Image: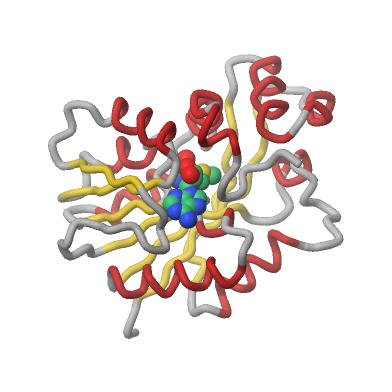
Amino acid sequence: MKNLQEKSPIYYAEADIYDAFAQAEDAEGLVLQALQPLVAGKRVLDLGCGTGKYVELLAPHAAHIIGLDAAPAQLAIARRRADGLRNVDFALGDALDASLPKEKYDIVLACWMLGTVADKAKRAAILRRMEKLAPHIVLVENAEGSEFEAVRGRVNDPRRRTRRYNEWLIGQGFRETDRLEALFEFRTVDEARNIFAAIWGEDKRPLLTARHIGHKIAIYQKRIGI
Ligand SMILES: C[S@@+](CC[C@H](N)C(=O)[O-])C[C@H]1O[C@@H](n2cnc3c(N)ncnc32)[C@H](O)[C@@H]1O
């Protein structure tokens, strides 16, 4: 089954398609607006940075930002995006155990990464590592009930995956600090169909009828030691 889970082939063999998806996501920049004050002047580690959307957008505000990803093809695009940005570095490896530059981080950021790790023990272990790396963790995640959730089969999902994951975060001491009503904006409805078909399968095509797709996003934060 196609999806965006941790080792999805899209990250390894079709990163340009993932990049088009990420660039269409949150067309109005609501996530950036929420993250900008949090990272201002801070040393940031972006775990699962993908093709570098938030590395590029946040670099002008942060003191320094390191993007880590396990997928070489994703990182290759991220490096191109960040070309010329002097306060940016990248590292290749698994968030669980990758060796990281031995500097101090103020914030560990993970945008749509932790929830892609289906193995619950590994997910918890990555979170424990995040807690050791910085005193402030910021997660950007999907919230329930959006058109996007409906298209990817998460509305009336008998396994209630989005809700269970978001509840797990609360149980781990996170607070939901922002709920954003965002939009994917593709150039055309056909572009949206092609990208969703490549990521989730051909059966998604008829579910997309417009180039905008509603997307509810939640931001979670945890401060360690508070
Ligand atoms: C849904 S994408 C999000 C990418 C990016 N943060 C964004 O907002 O566009 C998830 C990314 O996390 C990476 N990833 C997933 N599990 C990982 C892990 N255990 N270690 C490092 N990277 C991981 C994937 O390779 C992929 O690039």
Q: Residue at x 60, y 52 (%)?
A: 142
Q: Residue at x 38, y 71 (%)?
A: 129
Instruction: Pick the residue in front: 177 or 10.
Output: 10
Percent from the top left, x then y, of residue 100?
A: 25, 57
Instruction: Pick the residue in front: 10 or 23.
Output: 10
Percent from the top left, x then y, of residue 41?
A: 17, 54
Toward which corner of the image does residue 162 lie, by quadrant?
bottom right
Count of marks overlaid on the render? 0
Residue 213 located left or right of residue 87: right
Residue 140 in view here = no
Residue 205 located left or right of residue 221: right
Toward which corner of the image does residue 223 lie, by quadrant?
bottom left
- 11 versus 136 height, above or below: above
Residue 41 in view here = yes
Percent from the top left, x then y, of residue 208?
A: 77, 27
- 85 versus 163 height, above or below: above
Residue 166 located left or right of residue 63: right
Rendering colour mode:
secondary structure
Q: Residue at x 40, y 61 (%)?
A: 138
Which quadrant: the C terminus? bottom left
Percent from the top left, x then y, of residue 121?
A: 57, 72
Which quadrant: the N terminus? top right
Q: Residue at x 24, y 41 (%)?
A: 59
